[in-house]
């Protein structure tokens, strides 16, 4: 038991790690709540969906270009203009969950700067750059 206490004291989390982990926990739990809430909004029909539920069976297994033609579904970031529809409101919750780690990385920036930890600062900036690059869809544009 003494060895465990010694190891635990030797490997305590840094304040930045504790902040990151705490924020990550809160945001993920909030995102999951948002996901369940928006799914409920969709299932119970509080907002009309872009693709009616009765039509889903017909279009679900179509190739992408046919699905887009038959449903009028957006491509890329165009889905944000459809947040008033029940099906795309749920996608907002998924996007929120996808952005959680990026938000948490921003909490590391001031700490790394204040501690003059250049390696951590470089890694955080590189990671944030990758998030932006991935979200921009410049690497693999959708074609239809």
Image (spheres, grey):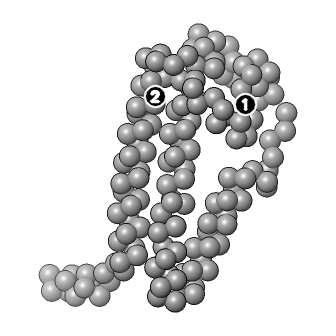
Quarter of the image containing the C terminus? top right
Q: Point out residue 97 in the picture as x, y percentages from the top left corner.
A: 50, 48
Q: Point out residue 42 in the picture as x, y percentages from the top left corner.
A: 49, 22
Direction from residue 32 to residue 49 in the image, left or right: right
Q: Residue at x 57, y 80 (%)?
A: 121
Point out the tag, 1 or 2, that comes first from the N-terminus: 2
Query: Crowdedness of circle 2 by 10 Å Cα count: few (<14), some, many (20+)?
Result: some
Quick one: SS at disc 1?
loop
Q: Which residue was labeled with disc 1?
A: 74
In this orientation, does residue 67 appear?
Answer: no
**Residue situated furthest left in the rendering:** 1
Q: Point out residue 21 in the picture as x, y percentages from the top left corner.
A: 38, 65
Q: Residue at x 58, y 19 (%)?
A: 49
The image shows a total of numbered marks equal to: 2
Residue 61 is marked as none
Quarter of the image containing the N terminus? bottom left
| Distance from Cα at disc 1 to Cα at disc 2 | 19 Å
Q: Point out residue 47 in the picture as x, y percentages from the top left corner.
A: 51, 19
Direction from residue 75 to residue 52 in the image, left or right: left
Q: Which residue was labeled with disc 2?
A: 39
Q: Residue at x 63, y 18 (%)?
A: 51
């Amino acid at each position: 038991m003494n060895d465990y206490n010694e190891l635990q004291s030797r490997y305590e989390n840094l304040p930045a790690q504790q902040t990151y982990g705490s924020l990550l926990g809160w945001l993920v739990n909030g995102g999951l709540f948002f996901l369940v809430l928006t799914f409920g909004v969709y299932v119970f029909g509080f907002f009309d969906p872009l693709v009616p539920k009765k039509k889903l069976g017909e279009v679900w297994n179509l190739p992408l270009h046919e699905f887009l033609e038959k449903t009028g579904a957006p491509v890329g970031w165009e889905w944000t203009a459809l947040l008033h529809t029940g099906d795309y409101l749920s996608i907002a919750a998924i996007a929120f969950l996808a952005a959680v780690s990026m938000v948490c990385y921003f909490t590391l920036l001031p700490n790394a700067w204040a501690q003059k930890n250049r390696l951590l600062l470089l890694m955080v900036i590189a990671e944030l750059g990758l998030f932006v690059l991935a979200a921009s869809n410049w690497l693999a544009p959708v074609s239809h």
